[in-house]
Image (cartoon, rainbow, N blue to C red):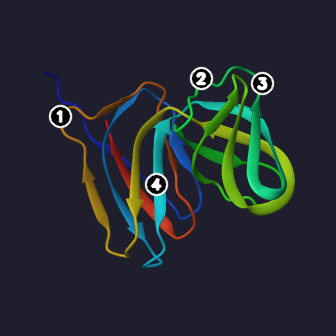
Amino acid sequence: MMQTDVKSFHVMTGTPAAISQRTRLKGAVVSNTSSGTPANVFFANNVSISGTYNIPGSTTCTVTTSTAHGLTTGDRVWLDFTSGTGTTDNAYTVTVTTTTAFTVTTASLTTSGNVSIYAQTLMEVDITNSVPVNIIVPGEGILATSGIFVGTPANIAATVFYG
């Protein structure tokens, strides 16, 4: 068995980050700077689907993709809203409506724009308190064929270990 050096990168609060080469997710340290505020850190293959979204003054956000998204109702995705106002990049549970559209529940807004969808989940970590959480992935780690995308909402930081 060949040994691989373990590398790391740090993801700042509310700013997604990624590496682009094939690798294995070995673990992470996740910390919440706002104790009592639950949040999700989302680790995915670094492959996104482009789409548009519309929130028509309700809590239902409809996302439309230009190609088939391959999702099923109940899947979790990270939505990176790249235009529009008031939307929060975060992990969401989808309800599929067609092969190129799905809905998620958001804050009640009236906005629309572009969105990048990260749907190939490697791992998701829920954190509530301000004590850092160490995640160790057993064995050889989780294969990330296209690299690792890490989505962190506000008040959350993560150090990712890969190799």
- Disc 3 element: loop
Image quadrant holding the C terminus, namely: top left
Specify few, some or many for label 3: CA neighbours under 10 Å numbering under 14, 14-19, or 20 or more: few
Q: Position of residue 87 (x, y in %)?
A: 74, 58
For mark 1, what is the residue? 139
Which residue sits at x=76%, y=42%? 62
From the viewer's perspective, is the residue at label 2 or at label 1 nearer? 2
Specify few, some or many for label 2: CA neighbours under 10 Å numbering under 14, 14-19, or 20 or more: few
Q: Is residue 136 left or right of residue 25?
A: left
Mark 1 / mark 4, whichever is N-terminal: 4
For mark 2, what is the residue? 70
Q: Is residue 89 left or right of residue 33?
A: right
For mark 3, what is the residue? 66
For mark 4, what is the residue? 41
Mark 4 / mark 3, whichever is N-terminal: 4
Instruction: Tell me how far mark 3 sits from mark 2, CA to CA.
Output: 12 Å
Mark 1 / mark 3, whichever is N-terminal: 3
Which residue sits at x=52%, y=62%? 12
Looking at the image, the residue that sits furthest to the bottom is 35
Name the residue nearer the viewer: 79 or 149: 79
Which residue sits at x=64%, y=25%? 69
